[in-house]
Image (spheres, rainbow, N blue to C red):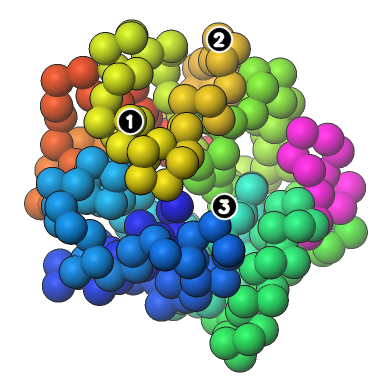
Amino acid sequence: MVAAARAIETHRHDALARDEFAEHFVRAARVSTHWPVRPEQVPGGEADPLWGRLGRYFALRTRALDDFLLATAHDGVRQVVLLGAGLDTRAFRLDWPAGCTVFEIDTPEVLAFKHDVLDGLDATARAVRTPIAADLRGDWTAALARAGFDPSAPAAWLAEGLLLYLPSASERQLMSCVDDLSAAGSSLAYEVKLGIERPEVRESPVYTETKRQIGVELLALFDGEPRPDSAADLADRGWVTAVCTPFDFTRRHGRGPRPQRDDALAANRWVFARKP
């Protein structure tokens, strides 16, 4: 679904981010072969709750996190760790400085699908790309170390579209591991959703149309446990954190979703943290 949103965004005249590989993932998966991958394939256009509003949310998130990673890399960080990398193609599409290594952690099945598609396109990474097959709910740090990660050097960590789906204990453990492995000068960006949404929000068109159009019930995917305050926990560990709303970036870029009544995006936060 997120890959389809990135594909649609790629072909907008005012694209916030471009991903030429995204539509190939969508077409390669049996469930999504008929999904739109271009703006003209969305009957409702920008007004469509799924491919319009939610799609633009994903595009805005992509742009904000692209900018975060490139800024850290241009500041001298040469290790990037994508936690739950999924169909992320940043190793292939971003203009990385020389010497950058992008570690991609995800399950073997996800990485195998991703490799099949990218190999078929003869895609060439723009950084040293190191995929790591591991489940983030278990012990993944040893695999990261074996892959060449250096905990004595700063790193940029990214958890995009991940923590919403993890049990609370797994989120706490993940943050603890990131802190333990982060040298001074490291950075972390991640997305969370605050609290349990009201019934009126759970009936938002973003949720109902996603289920109706593609059969994905987002609310059933979100973990229902009370969420930890990971930003506060990181601050207690000495990190400097900034908690932002998506609408902060809509205002910055002049495009993207704007607040609505009973908004399914209102509880979403993007957190940017730095370890001095």
Amino acid type of disc 3? Ala
The tag on residue 61 is none
Distance of mark 3 from mark 1, alpha carbons?
35 Å
Magenta stretch: includes residue 125:
no
Amino acid type of disc 2? Pro
Q: In this rendered view, identify the residue nearer to me: 158 or 233.
A: 158
Distance of mark 3 from mark 2, alpha carbons?
27 Å
Q: Is residue 155 left or right of residue 200?
A: right
Amino acid type of disc 1? Thr
Residue where numbered disc 1 is placed: 208
Segment colored magenta? 132-143
Could you tell me which residue is drawn at 44 percent across and 53 percent down?
2
Residue 28 percent coordinates (x, y): 57, 71
Dot 1: few (<14), some (14–19), or many (≥20) neighbours within 10 Å?
some
Residue 95 percent coordinates (x, y): 44, 77
Determine the secondary structure under disc 1.
helix
Residue 270 percent coordinates (x, y): 39, 35
Q: Is residue 58 visible?
A: yes
Residue 248 percent coordinates (x, y): 20, 37
Residue where numbered disc 3 is placed: 156
